[in-house]
Amino acid sequence: MADDMANPLMERLETFAKSDEERRAFITDLIKVNSNLEKELRTAKSDHLDQLVSRRMWQERAQNSESRLNESQGSAASNGFMLCLIDGDGYLFNDNLISQGANGGGEAATRLLDNIKRHIQHFEGAMQWKIMVRIYANLEGLLKKYTYINFVEEKKALLQFVVGFTQIQPLFDFIDAGQGKERADHKIKEQLSLFINNSYCKHIMLGVAHDNGYVPALDPYKNNPAAVSRIALIEPLHLGWEFSKLPFEVTRFESLFRSQELPNDRVPPKGQPRPYSSSPFNQPSQPQAPQSHRPVVGQDLITRRPIYPGPLLLNKDDERVDEYLGTPSDRGEANLESRIRSGTKLCNMFHLRGHCIDTGCPYSHEPSLEGEELVAFALKARLTACHAGSSCRSKSCVSGHLCPHGSNCWRKKCYFSKVHHVDPKVHHIDPKVDHEVMDTR
């Protein structure tokens, strides 16, 4: 009986003991979990504190950076400048300015400054910009050229002009680049490369559009909208045909540069007659016949050899028109392009005018162009619009006076837009010119 009662009690005792062990294990697990949670909490607090410190540090740095940026922007705005680079061998100042020596140089600098200010006035903050101008030229070569054609009576006139130009403005420099065409080119290209990445340089104007040799220096920037908006070209006497493919703005400076090229021959002193030239390029290209030398009135087509100087043809409105030279053959164009691609540029003066007075001319003279190649070269030269347009009266001008596409031109930025209205039909020859046109059709 006692044994029967003891067994249930032992079973219950074992049950209580097992329950105590489970409770103890449970509490032990709770303590471990709590301990782990406390560690995680301490880690989280530490990370949170680090984040607070880091955030405050970066906030402070951001504020400092913003402050420095504002200061830099303010400094850039107050110390910003624009740069004007001009090839003085291709952009020749007006005769009346050079002939005045130092006074003319000062006047040229003032006019240039006024033209630049008019160009940049629409840019934000432009009125605070400093204006820096650098003109590079072969002064000895220019001096020889001017004295050869009797343009300057005293050799000092050109040098005095340069001094006057440089002195009138503190940031204006007229620099002698030395002999050789590539001297000025190299300096201007390096200046462009240096300043295009300068954040203080807000705008760059380039007087280089007469020479296609500058195009490769501008090619890297033609697809960059920011660079395109910062670069502008000064319109030259004859715009290089490759510049018409570039997206840069072309602006004209009034009453500053020559509107016609320098004459090839010596100009006699006032009061003396011009000497007769025996140059074969001033003679008829074929034997004369009584009727064949007269212009064909009311026709679009008049042909002769593409040698300048030649007849100055006018329409019924006394507007300059170009003489018809025919269509070059595929062979002629191919031969010309092959020679151009050989690396040496052809001299317009020598091949189209018959002679070149520049003893240091860097362009190719020999072998001289003939026949189909000469026609192709003359037509290529006419792709450059004449600065004077239909009012040009230079019989030696090799540039174009009519749009190649005529009045139906579709180009949005055509450099011949001012002569689209001109009637291309030849009406008469300028009576001041004693050359005649030979009709060889």
Image: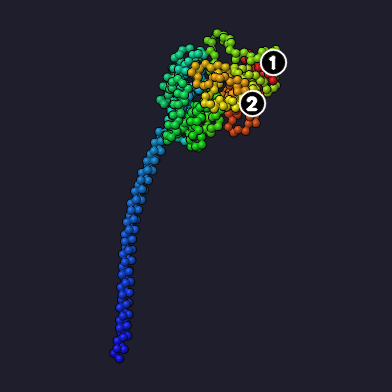
Q: Residue at x 50, y 28 (%)?
A: 214
Q: Which residue is mark 1?
A: 292
Asked where in the image residue 64 lies, by quadrant, the reply is top left
Q: Residues within 10 Å of mark 2 (few under 14, many from 20)?
A: few
Q: Which label sits in the foreground, 1 or 2?
A: 2
Q: Is residue 286 visible in this depiction of the protein?
A: yes
Q: Residue furthest top?
A: 272
Q: Secondary structure at mark 2?
A: loop
Instruction: Point out the image quarter for the N terminus.
Output: bottom left
Q: In x, y percent, where is residue 97?
A: 49, 18
Asked where in the image residue 259 lies, by quadrant, the reply is top right
Instruction: Point out the image quarter for the C terminus.
Output: top right
Decide which of tag 1 and tag 2 comes sooner along the chain: 1
Looking at the rendered structure, the kind of residue marked 1 is Ser
Q: Which residue is mark 2?
A: 329
Please state which of residues 14 and 407 is positioned toward the viewer in this rendering.
14
Q: Is residue 402 visible in this depiction of the protein?
A: no
Looking at the rendered structure, the kind of residue marked 2 is Ser
Q: In x, y percent, where is residue 399?
A: 58, 23
Q: What's the CA distance linking mark 1 and mark 2?
A: 25 Å
Q: Residue at x 45, y 26 (%)?
A: 186
Q: Secondary structure at mark 1?
A: loop
